[in-house]
Image (cartoon, rainbow, N blue to C red):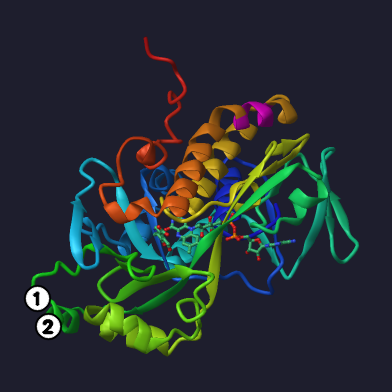
Amino acid sequence: MSGGGFAGLTAATALAQRGWSVRLHERSPELRTEGAGIVLWNNSLQVIDAIKAGPDLMSRSMTPPAYETRMNNVIQSQETLDGIRWRTLTRPHLFQTLLVAAREAGVEVVAGSEVVGASPDGTIRFANGDSAEADLIIGADGVGSAVRDSLDIPLKRERSRDGITRFLVPRRKAELQALEPDTEWDNVIDFWNLDPRVLRVLYTPANDEELYIALMSPAADADGSRVPIDLDLWTSVFPQLAPVLEDAAKTPGRYYGYQTTRLDHWTEGKVALIGDAAHAMCPALAQGAGCAMQNAWTLAVAATEADDIPAALIDWERLERPYTDIAQDRSQWYADTREMAKGNQFQGDSVVTATYNPTDPHRHEVHA
Ligand code: FAD
Ligand code: 5PR
């Protein structure tokens, strides 16, 4: 296994729990996560339950009362997402939850170990010159995947015009309440401004103490995408968020551009790619990690049941890929059009992946 992010930790845990002996190689000297907050939907929450990490995840996460969308501070929609399971949390909490599950399952984690490539026959190669043989090799090494690049799989990459800077800051609910008493500050609130200037703040409470805020601007807007953030600019557009923007301005931050990568195929011989290595996507539907975990789980199940690993991997991609493709396509469309600013986004094709249950053994049965 190459890569100890959300994809790699989930696959390693699910395999080890099924009796595999799993070694996970992580390039960084220690296992940790970058970024601030995250939203998970039913598809990944089912996986969390299935690897027995549910209680840990639930202990420090929340389901906000509604997903609210505003344009120029006018409410467009307040979606209560009835019947859809979703949780907001911090990335460090998700990461710790998965790391504990991996350790309990007996995964051997090797930090400071860089993978440089793999071959379809089941050989994995390391930067220190070593190599090893395995029944199954998983490339979960992120958007810059060395495993993927070593296989020369045709790849299409699309970069979007917008990008985002993400922060984890204290909630400061009482101060926000004082500035705007009629607002439900436990909601996710997606504050859009398109005119005269494209600037957006996605406000996502992650638990009672921590708030995730994502500040979006076009990459071409030098002041909007500057880090540390231009506090005067952001508070002039979003005065009701001043207390939390002040905290964000004290953090260095990093501006991330959006990108989508699509591979011709996700598997070759005994090698499979999952997560951003296989299918990086724009964040609009909050499904990058969700799809990573869903594919990690279904891969572990398919490989365990397989007589012939290469054939089983091809079958796995054929059955599972449509749920990722639709999330990539919808997220890309939202990034291109900024249509999310109109609200009422969680319907139809936009919730196909969110409501999927990858742990249901009967999920691919055709119902007459
Ligand atoms: P990564 O997290 O990139 O992990 C890859 C790991 O592999 C890293 O630890 C890296 O150090 C290691 N590695 C890399 N190269 C090597 C090598 N050669 N050898 C060994 N190890 C290596 N998703 C959601 O589901 N919900 C959200 O709300 C959400 N919000 C997002 C917001 C933004 C702004 C962005 C940019 C993304 C968001 N995502 C979200 C997407 C999500 O963060 C990613 O899809 C997810 O983290 C991918 O996980 P991964 O394990 O595939 O890759
Ligand atoms: N949802 C989440 C998110 O972090 C972003 C988006 C949607 C959880 C961006 O950071 O639409 O861009 C989005």
Asked whether the viewer can see residue 99, the reply is: no
In the figure, is residue 97 to the left or right of 77? right
Q: Residue at position x 37%, y 48% from top?
A: 41
* Disc 1 to disc 2: CB gap under 8 Å: yes
Q: In x, y percent, where is residue 10?
A: 54, 51
Q: Residue at position x 32%, y 62% from top?
A: 61
Question: How crowded is the residue under tag 2: few (<14 C-alpha within 10 Å), some, or many (20+)?
Answer: few
Q: In x, y percent, where is residue 22?
A: 68, 50
Is residue 315 highlighted in magenta?
A: yes
* Span of residues in magenta: 312-317
> Residue 351's quadrant in the figure?
top left
User: Which residue is nearer to you in this view: 273 or 203?
Assistant: 203
Quickly name the residue at label 1: 181
Determine the quadrant in which ligand 1 lies: bottom right
In the figure, is residue 334 to the left or right of 87? right
User: Which residue is nearer to you in this view: 141 or 165?
Assistant: 165
User: Which residue is nearer to you in this view: 92 or 50?
Assistant: 92
Element type at mark 1: loop
In the figure, is residue 213 to the left or right of 254? left
Q: Residue furthest front?
A: 196
Q: Residue at position x 72%, y 30% from top?
A: 309
Quickly name the residue at label 2: 178
Q: Residue furthest left?
A: 182
Q: Residue at position x 40%, y 36% from top?
A: 357
Amino acid carrying mark 1 in the image: Pro
Element type at mark 2: helix
Question: For the stretch drawn in magenta, what is the main secondary structure?
Answer: helix
Amino acid carrying mark 2 in the image: Ala
Screen quadrant of the C terminus: top left
Q: In x, y percent, where is residue 266?
A: 68, 39
Task: Please determine whether, in this image, residue 19 is positioned above or below residue 247.
Answer: above
Is residue 236 highlighted in magenta?
A: no
